[in-house]
Amino acid sequence: MKIMLLVAVFICKFFFKGLLELTSLRALGTLSDLMLSDSWSRLCFLLKSGGFVMYPLLAASFLLGMIILERAWSYRSLGRHLRAFHLECLNAILKKEFESVRTLCRAHPDLPSAELVSLALERRFSQDPRLQSSWVRALERKRRMINGDLRKSLWILGTIGSAAPLVGLFGTVVGILGSFQEMARLNSGGFSVVAAGISESLIATASGIIVAIVALLSFNTLQTRCTQLILIMGLQMEELVDVLSEFSEGSECGSKF
């Protein structure tokens, strides 16, 4: 996962650097003699040259970065604590140290496994026979809700990856139309008349492709990691069900719950 994220960042850096050099060294028409002093100035020039579609692409890039960092950090933290918490909980349950299990669950309020364990113990040893008889189904429903929470925001990465090239292409089409309108206004033909407008409008397409590449690489990487975590939690839940099923329904072990 770390390697894929580093590759995505490298590709983004490589393409943006190439675009910045292209705009600073090969700008055509009246912009051919423009000397840009630093990267910030070149970036501003890039946004201006690409047209109005560069602003939604820039906003999508910021959103993309925030989602990648948040999901990567969340999955990394979850993967680091998931196995240790599960083993500690199972050992305490097998020893019938249910108060220790409650303390452990309270110590990890943000861990999905803690929510599953708390719900399992509460339902399994409930004084209400209706809740006790449906504790496995309740646990499965809770697990599905957690799975949905783990996948949150990933759809945004997929949407950006699919829409960014189309947004860039739309900007290119608008730029080319503007170039032909300028040619009609000047009542002259030839490639030299529209070359500057077309070259600048292609920046939008290139930017959309860059954003899409980073979004799709990140989406596939995070989606794979999310699937792995969901599988691990599913196996751990099955093991938890097997252990708790060995206790009799009238056991006093869960009276504290």
Image (tube, rainbow, N blue to C red):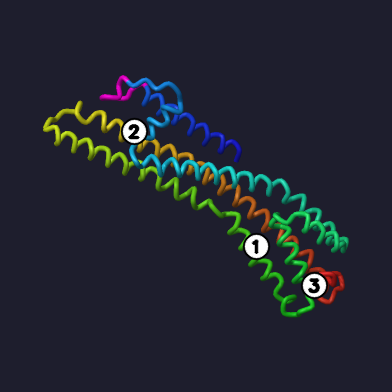
Name the mark on residue 143.
Answer: 1
Q: Position of residue 66 (x, y in %)?
A: 55, 44
Q: Position of residue 212 (x, y in %)?
A: 44, 42
Q: What residue lies at 84% left-to-right and 57% top-to-bottom?
A: 91
Q: Secondary structure at mark 3?
A: loop
Residue 49 marker: 2
* Residue 180 vertical placement versus 116 (above, below): above
Single out the residue that lies furthest toward the bottom: 129
User: Magenta span covers which residues?
Assistant: 25-33
Task: Please name the residue that numbered disc 3 is placed on.
Answer: 125
Q: Is residue 159 left or right of residue 177?
A: right
Picture quadrant where residue 130 is located: bottom right
Q: In the figure, 125 relative to 81: above or below?
A: below
In the image, what residue occupies the spot 78% across and 55% down?
Answer: 107
Nearer mark to the viewer, of 2 and 1: 2
Amino acid at circle 3 = Phe
User: Could you give the CA–CA distance between mark 2 and mark 1, rounded to whole angstroms?
Assistant: 49 Å
Q: Secondary structure at mark 2?
A: helix
Q: Which image quarter holds the C terminus?
A: bottom right
Q: Residue at x 61, y 38 (%)?
A: 2
C-beta proximity under 8 Å, tags 1 and 3: no
Q: Nearer the viewer, residue 62 or 167?
A: 62
The Cα atoms of the two marked residues, 3 and 2, are separated by: 67 Å
Q: Is residue 154 left or right of residue 77?
A: left
The image shows residue 36 at horizontal and vertical percentages of 39, 22
| Above-or-below relation of 74 to 45 | below
**Closest to the observer, 37 or 234:** 37
Percent position (x, y) of residue 129? 75, 80
Q: Is residue 56 magenta?
A: no
2 displayed left or right of 91: left
